[in-house]
Amino acid sequence: MDDRRSGSALERADDGIVAGRAMDGDVAAFAVLVRRYTPMMRAYTQRMLNASSDVDDIVQDAFVTAWQRLPELDEPVKVKSWLMRIVSRKAVDRLRAQRPVLDIDDVEHPAPSHASPPRIAETRAEVEALAAALRELPDGQRECWVLREIGGYSYDEIAEELDIPVTTARGLLARARKYIIVRMEEWR
């Protein structure tokens, strides 16, 4: 009974407390982090790679790395961004290794149940147009766009992640945005 209450309390605790306990070797605390952040890490990785067979492997690998590197976490309260950086690096490494074409055509964005069939068809066509536009971007521009627009990374984080200068990251992102805006003009 006591364990159940402490597990419940651990589930409700903020990131700093949970990460701090995990850093002290508390496996149950690390399990809370895994449950808390797996959905977000999976969604991010899915959008980066658009390869469902690799997503779970990459997220699992990210958590293994996180467990091994927990002592390196300087600020436990920032565990979310730390985990996202780890999974992002794993995803970028996989992209670089495979150099696949990101195909967002397979990503379904279900419309609300009250949406009309024409609206559903229009939404799917818009998603297909965005997927086509992203496929046409050079790898560097696409990576910057995905990290910024889907991952929510800052310019500094993008530069660090891709190992490029911040000015290069800004330039690649600006070109990617300009291309997407022009390409998606009919959908505005």
Image: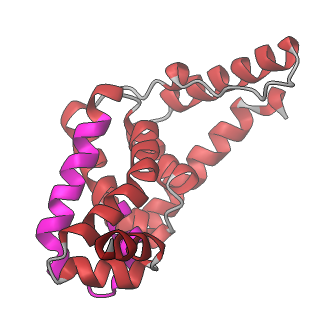
Q: Is residue 10 left or right of residue 137?
A: left
Quadrant of the rendering where the N terminus is positioned:
bottom left
Residue 128 is situated, as x and y percent measured from the top left of the image, at 63, 20
Task: Name the dominant secondary structure of the magenta segment.
Answer: helix
Above or below, comparing residue 146 to residue 78 in the picture: above
Q: Is residue 17 left or right of residue 172?
A: left
Residue 69: quarter of image: bottom left
Quadrant of the rendering where the C terminus is positioned:
top right
Q: Residue furthest left?
A: 68
Residue 120: quarter of image: top right
Which region shows up in magenta? 55-84
Nearest the viewer among 46 and 28 is 28
At horizontal 35% and vertical 77% (from top left) the residue drawn is 6
At horizontal 64% and vertical 28% (from top left) the residue drawn is 109
Residue 66 is situated, as x and y percent measured from the top left of the image, at 21, 65
Nearest the viewer among 154 and 31 is 31
Residue 137 is situated, as x and y percent measured from the top left of the image, at 50, 34
Above or below, comparing residue 40 to residue 98 in the picture: below
At horizontal 14% and vertical 77% (from top left) the residue drawn is 25
Per the image, is 71 magenta? yes
Question: In this view of the protein, can residue 165 be seen by the observer?
Answer: no
Residue 110: quarter of image: top right
Q: Is residue 74 left or right of residue 78?
A: left
Q: What colour scheme does the image use?
A: secondary structure
